Image (tube, helix red, strand yellow):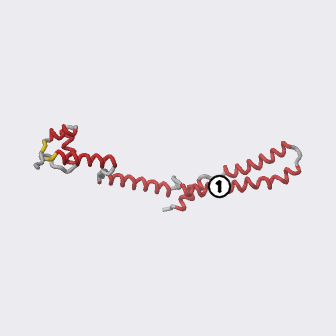
Amino acid sequence: MAVSKTTQAQAAKHLGMSVNRLKQVLLQLNMPTRGFDLDELRLNYIIGLRKTASGRSREYDLTQERARLAHWQATKAEKECAVMDGELIPADIIGEEWGSMISAWRARARAIPSTVAPQVAIEKVVPKIHAMLLEAIDDALQEMADHDPNELAELTRKKYSR
């Protein structure tokens, strides 16, 4: 049985596309641009559509991928320099410092009752007791507020110095 050959115009009409689009499809499918079999074209076109729909047909542009890599490397280098200069503080250092600050404040806050209890025990006037407790709490909060944020930058510089 002889295979019938089809013109580009007939094939384009059959697939519902322009002749120019058909030429692009033929190039993508690595098929001859003249004297092709319509059934073979249709089958290859459907397989190509399925690959595209499933995401398996992604073609990589080497130049574009190199540009992405170069951009990523430049961004990484900028971040590393910012860390070494103390302008950017890594999350692990912030986590450690924040944890130690909270632990220190927690210890200080838990010490308030034992520090203030003897003074409160001898006091009979409620407003004075209230003032003593507020003073102890304010002292503990002030200790936390007095923390120098530049210590983190200095800690980062030391850890990641050039």
Numbered-mark total: 1
Q: In percent of the image, x 57 and y 59: which residue is there?
A: 155
Q: Nearer the viewer, residue 65 or 159?
A: 65
Helix, strand or loop at mark 1:
helix
With respect to residue 33, does 161 lie above or below?
below
Q: Which residue is mark 1?
A: 101
Question: In the image, residue 142 lies at what x, y percent?
Answer: 70, 49
Q: Is residue 90 left or right of residue 128?
A: left
Q: Nearer the viewer, residue 9 or 124?
A: 9
The amino acid type found where label 1 is placed reads Met
Counting other residues with Cα less than 10 Å from the Cα at mark 1, is it few (<14), some (14-19), or many (20 or more)?
A: some
With respect to residue 10, does 108 lie above or below?
below
Q: In percent of the image, x 20 and y 51: which residue is there?
A: 30
Question: In the image, residue 105 lies at what x, y percent?
Answer: 69, 54
Question: In the image, residue 42 lies at what x, y percent?
Answer: 21, 45
Question: In the image, residue 81 lies at what x, y percent?
Answer: 46, 56
Choose top left, top right, bottom left or bottom right for residue 100.
bottom right
Farthest residue toward the front?
Answer: 1
